[in-house]
Amino acid sequence: MERIDWRTTYGLWKEGGLYLPHSLSKPITAKPVFVEYNNEGFIYGYDWLENENAEGRIKIVSERPTQFLLFTEPSNKGTIQTAQMLVEAKDEEERAAIWIAATTFELRNLNLKNGINGFASKLHSSAISFLLDRYYLWHHAMRKLVPEIMIPYSVLDSIQCSQIETVMGLVQTNVMLLEGAYTVLRYSSLSDTEIEKEGSIKDLSVRR
């Protein structure tokens, strides 16, 4: 498979973004949710929920923290890691690489026979090569890295894909749809001051 260097891939992202809303270049922020926790250790972690479910989750965490801690299943681990990486990304280039790597991971695994899979694989490899020395990457067993591909399968399957720019457009379209439909939450039993004192999330030893 012919490889594409990251400079070329990022150039495609930037070029595609010229015709799309500015939201693609904006930082991703997480909505802080305080979790009351009086036992040893502390709670700190991310989640990624549809907008209509996020407010209900916040209500449960705020009013019934025990129910949240004992009975609420967190989202898929791969998508949670993607959310954390996006929030902690240092700049637009890192966010672009995370979005491209995570989205093309999903696209290349769809049962399509129109060229999308091949171009998605090339973009995925290119983005991963940029991220390798910057992040602890997704575990190989993770089968889902974004909450969903929101572009209907019937639309994807009908596209005759003959150029890589088409797949970059699909990635960016899905990013915009996800940003509009999902909320990133950051659960914590620590105050912001305590978080700064403990250090980066990467260094925290106790997590939910």
Image: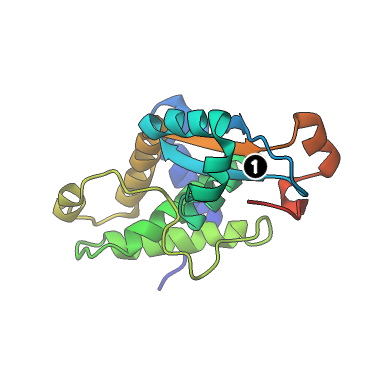
Tell which residue pokes out farthest to the right in this image: 197
**Residue for point 48% across, 47% down:** 72
Q: Nearer the viewer, residue 119 or 197?
A: 197
Residue 105 sits above or below residue 74 on the image: below
Residue 27 sits above or below residue 160 on the image: above
The x and y percentages for residue 73 are: 47, 51
Residue 52 sits above or below residue 198 on the image: above
**Drawn side of residue 50 relative to residue 126, left or right:** left
Tag 1: Cα neighbours inside 10 Å, few (<14), some, or many (≥20)?
some
Quarter of the view holding residue 189: top right
The x and y percentages for residue 185 are: 54, 36
The x and y percentages for residue 44 are: 67, 44
The kind of residue on which mark 1 rests is Glu
Q: Is residue 4 visible?
A: no
Q: Nearer the viewer, residue 86 or 35?
A: 35
Q: Which element carries disc 1, helix, strand or loop?
A: helix
**Drawn side of residue 19 relative to residue 87, left or right:** left
Q: Is residue 116 visible?
A: yes
What residue did someone put label 1 on?
A: 88
**Residue for point 39% across, 64% down:** 121
